[in-house]
Amino acid sequence: MNKQKLKGNLMMLLTALIWGTAFVAQSSAMDSVDPFSFMAARNLLGAIVLIPVILIFSDKKAKSDQKNTWIGGVVCGAILFVASALQQYGLVYTTTAKAGFITTLYVVLVPLAGLFLGKKVMPVVWISVLLSVVGFYFLCINENFTLAPGDLLVLLCAVAFTVHIMVIDHFSPKADGIKMSCIQFLVCGLLSLLFSLICGPASPQALLSAWIPILYTGILSSGVAYTLQILAQKFTDAVMVSLIGSLEAVFATLFGFLFWKIGYIDNGNVTLQQLGGCALVFAAVILVQLPLKKGEKYETS
């Protein structure tokens, strides 16, 4: 492995670490503020953080379609709001370990979404889907053979993130990616603020008590991690970026358990059954992203 590729892989590893630990921050924030207020603070801060990123990393010579940049940003922001709300409310009723791995199911759901666009899917994808479904059963079904409300919400969140990825895939070739991301954070933040005002906004004291999770998710998870991902893709291939990025679920589990042990959160315990489910879901995520033979691809039109 050359130094440039190693540099990109290490950047993506740090990105996955930040995103994975963000589940702990999101969960702990629910002890102080409501989901909509937290989402508003996080996303508006993320939009602000991306402004200097735009000034530094945007290619001023590149000709991007401003119309598609704005349309893509607004649409993605609305979908991100739905996905984030489902995830944030799900974290109130489930563990960070479950939330991390269930959210990662979007990696398997994305090629499945291609079926609705008339694309054929290779058998390896169906194997991954079977593994993920079995893993999801062991991860989320309790002793009474029922799903917890939080698990269902996070599963719907994974579906929403699948739609989010498909929309980005449509607009990104025509738009300025960093500007579109900033717009989506702004839209998501404003929608969150609106719903927060309708439902009853958090008090300034409550927001101050959650300042660490807000700063962490707003600056690091949104701003820094997004920038690292952009830089990483300059040095390493897309398959490796996706593979390493999926490790966010592993970090969510490990750090959720760690912070539960030290008493920072109260819902991070992991059972052997859940670990088995995590292993199966992670295996599905890895399998669907393994490099194919030359000339092969997962989806064909």
Image (spheres, rainbow, N blue to C red):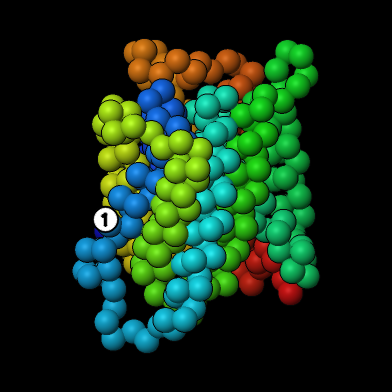
Q: Measured along the vertical axis of the image, is residue 163 above or below residue 65? A: above
Whether residue 20 is visible here, answered yes or no, is: no
Front position in the image: 266 or 9:
266
Front position in the image: 240 or 205:
205
Which residue is found at the position 71% from the left and 63% from the top? 114
x and y, in percent, of residue 59 in the image:
29, 78
Which residue is found at the position 51% from the left and 73% from the top? 71
Q: Is residue 61 left or right of residue 85?
A: left
x and y, in percent, of residue 179 in the image:
36, 69
Whether residue 264 is visible here, answered yes or no, is: yes
Q: How many marks?
A: 1
x and y, in percent, of residue 267 in the image:
49, 18
x and y, in percent, of residue 273 in the image:
64, 18
Q: Which residue is mark 1?
A: 49
Front position in the image: 165 or 93:
93
Which residue is found at the position 78% from the left and 19% from the top? 145
Front position in the image: 173 or 213:
213
Screen quadrant of the C terminus: bottom right
Few, some or many residues within 10 Å of mark 1 (<14, 14–19, 20+) = some
Amino acid on which the number 1 mark rests in the picture: Val
Which residue is found at the position 48% from the left and 53% from the top? 191
